[in-house]
Image (spheres, rainbow, N blue to C red):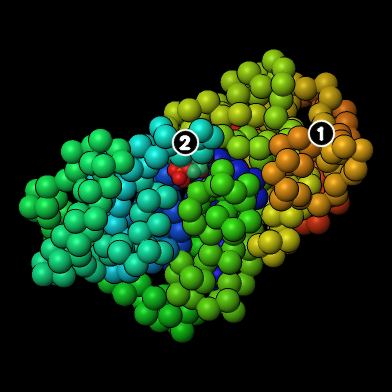
Amino acid sequence: MNTAIVGLQWGDEGKGKIIDILAEKADYIVRFQGGNNAGHTVVVGDREFVFHLIPSGILHKAKTCVIANGVVIDPESLLSEMEYLDKNGIKLKSNLKISELCHIIMPYHRILDKLRESKRTQRIGTTGRGIGPCYADKISRCGIRAVDLLNPNVFKEKLEDNLKEKNEIFKKVYKHPGFDLDQLYNQYFDYGKRISKYICNTTILLQEVVKKNKSILFEGAQGTFLDIDFGTYPFVTSSNTTAGGICNGSGMPPETINKVVGVVKAYTTRVGEGPFPTEFKDELSDIIREKGREFGATTGRPRRCGWFDAVLVKYATSLSGVREVAMMKLDVLDNLKEISVCVSYKYKGKIFRNFPYDFEVLTGAQPVYKTFKGWCSDLSKIHKFNRLPRNALNYLCALEDLILAKIRIVSVGSARSETIFR
Ligand code: IMP
């Protein structure tokens, strides 16, 4: 049984915790898109781990974690994450595999990411990790892949070609001095050597895994509305965060994905710029941010907060074929007397029940809310679904009808034990 986990909002839904729980039943945990823009937080006992690149399943012994071809890798970030794991007593050996086809984030990608942002009238609010420029080079067919780092001739030739063009752009457009070929070559060839033992053809590896009937957990990063095709473009990331990204990002055919679990927060958050129809306009924003500890795991930026948007999530479940949902952070709403859910948008007198892509409509849309009574009690000690207070059950059942998916997991705290399975 192979399961995929995808975020149904703008990322930060709490995927790290669900991946950690579901990883127990999987043999292989596979990341298929994004890079170190992600921040997956996992709490084990009184310790908190944050992963950016290495699948969060690495905390489980006897599991193999795979960084598949759809992921972009910053070797500096990867090496420092490896060091972080080592310091925390987690040993990497044959339990980590990296696809030779992963594109490599180079310093010019990181710098270009920041320079481009500084020149934009409408900033995207990227994480500044070089994700967009690296994927852009992949599509422009001038990217450098993990396999290239291992071959001195190929690597040098590709890097030289890149720098010829890029250095001119850096100097002329951005007044940046550019990059030295030898220095960059030596530095990244060395990184290549240090990660070489993990690099292989992960597609063949995973195909063998499927043949042997072992199970795979696909670990999505970011969320549906950051998807390069289906998100709130251009305020998105540069990869396919929906379930469709799994096939291209890992080389696994569609029939190998047996189930897609959507992860969603009981309210909505977003980091970075872009439309957010249900964003709080009052002090509720601070209350939820404090209670939900809504600060970016990668950049530390405060997250924007708002009510649950069922228009958005219903579209997300349809895009990834999600039938089962994990509802995260329900406890954050514990003290609210009333809880609202957006059921449609209104713009210039017209009602929108489906997610609109017209930028003017999306940015000007007024949410139409349905309001529910809060439960005003502590959920964190509840372990059974039917023991939830009546008002919490009403809220969850109404959401199920709106998003057209079953809520199978409810999270009422950050610890593994604070999870209700239905
Ligand atoms: P980039 O992926 O760094 O290019 O950033 C593009 C947009 O995606 C920005 O709004 C980021 O804040 C957002 N983003 C990227 N990764 C994450 C994530 O893991 N969680 C939430 N937002 C993210």
Amino acid tagged 1: Gln
Residue located 11% across and 52% down the image:
181
Percent from the top left, x then y, of residue 289? Answer: 60, 24
| Distance CA(mark 1)–CA(mark 2) | 27 Å
Please tell me how crowded label 1 is: few (under 14), some (14-19), or many (20+) other residues with Cα within 10 Å: some
Residue 11 seen in the current view = no
The relative height of residue 102 versus residue 406 in the rendered view (above or below) is below
Please tell me how crowded label 2 is: few (under 14), some (14-19), or many (20+) other residues with Cα within 10 Å: few
Q: In this view, does 206 lie to the left or right of 175?
A: right
Q: Is residue 243 left or right of residue 145?
A: right
The mark lying in front, picked from 1 and 2, is 2
Residue located 59% across and 48% down the image:
233
Q: Return the residue nearer the eye: 128 or 378.
A: 128
- Mark 1 highlights which residue? 366
> Is label 1 in a helix, a strand or a loop?
strand
Q: Residue 228 carries which label?
A: none
Residue located 42% across and 44% down the image:
37
Q: In this view, does 361 lie to the left or right of 123?
A: right
Q: Return the residue nearer the eye: 201 or 41.
A: 201
Amino acid tagged 2: Arg
Residue located 85% across and 47% down the image:
352
Q: Which mark is residue 120?
A: 2
Percent from the top left, x then y, of residue 357? Answer: 71, 50
